[in-house]
């Protein structure tokens, strides 16, 4: 079981970045999707999910992936978009990047919202893909298919996951004790 918090603008709203990350993951052979409408984000810890919920705790859900779903995560990552932003900031002046990609990285200046705008305007598509691939190549991406009757194991991961496919969401009512029905 995982937890989902929604109702706050804690994380940047960059749907095109999530789409580009999904495309990069697909190029690497992963099937999980971060595209809006195709997957759902969740957290391993309830306290992590509460950071994305409303002030009074409204907008909290338990999330149970069902057979046929795929659970994808980056080992050690609490929020992939925020980590991508940090990576963009450091990559802007990294000497390993040359050619067309380096001026593009400097123009973006580590701002995921600017990166999202480039994607939405369909600008610098090759540079966008190269940047996403460079970022993802440094990560330990993992994925597991949910099968009927098998226990889901994600090792010691303690951060964000995204679930593609069927899952059950159940609201967690603020102030009430909660027991998951798995």
Image (cartoon, helix red, strand yellow):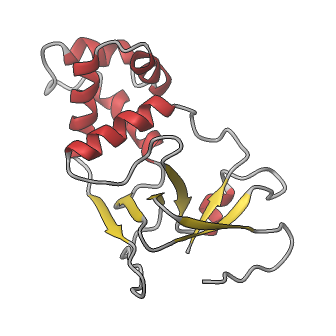
For image coordinates 30% across by 19% down, the residue present is: 105
Q: How many labels does the image show?
A: 0
User: Front-most of 74 and 150?
Assistant: 150
The picture places residue 41, in percent across and down from the top left corner, at 53, 54
Q: To which quarter of the image does residue 86 belong?
A: top left
For image coordinates 34% across by 61% down, the residue present is: 75
The picture places residue 37, in percent across and down from the top left corner, at 53, 44
Which residue extends farthest bottom? 149
User: Front-most of 1 and 146?
Assistant: 146
For image coordinates 40% across by 73% down, the residue present is: 146
User: Front-most of 87 and 66?
Assistant: 66
The picture places residue 83, in percent across and down from the top left corner, at 41, 42
- Locate residue 46 relative to residue 43 in the image: left or right: right
For image coordinates 21% across by 42% down, the residue present is: 27
Q: To which quarter of the image does residue 107 belong?
A: top left
The picture places residue 48, in percent across and down from the top left corner, at 60, 60
108 w.r.t. 67: above or below: above
User: Front-most of 64 and 166?
Assistant: 166
- Locate residue 176 relative to residue 79 in the image: left or right: right
**Image quarter hosting the C terminus:** bottom right
168 w.r.t. 118: above or below: below
Q: To which quarter of the image does residue 123 belong?
A: top left
**Image quarter hosting the N terminus:** bottom right
């Amino acid at each position: 079981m995982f937890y989902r918090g929604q109702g706050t603008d804690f994380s940047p709203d960059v749907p095109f970045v999530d789409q580009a990350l999904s495309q990069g993951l697909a190029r690497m052979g992963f099937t999980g999707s971060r595209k809006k409408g195709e997957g759902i984000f969740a957290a391993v810890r309830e306290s992590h999910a509460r950071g994305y919920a409303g002030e009074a705790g409204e907008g909290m859900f338990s999330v149970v992936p069902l057979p046929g779903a795929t659970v994808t995560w980056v080992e050690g990552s609490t929020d992939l978009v925020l980590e991508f932003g940090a990576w963009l900031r450091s990559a802007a002046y990294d000497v390993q990047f040359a050619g067309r990609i380096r001026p593009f990285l400097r123009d973006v200046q580590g701002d995921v919202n600017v990166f999202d705008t480039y994607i939405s305007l369909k600008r610098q598509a090759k540079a966008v893909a190269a940047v996403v691939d460079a970022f993802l190549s440094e990560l330990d991406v993992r994925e597991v298919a949910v099968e009927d009757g098998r226990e889901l194991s994600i090792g010691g991961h303690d951060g964000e996951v995204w679930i593609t496919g069927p899952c059950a969401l159940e609201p967690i009512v603020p102030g009430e004790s909660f027991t998951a029905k798995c």
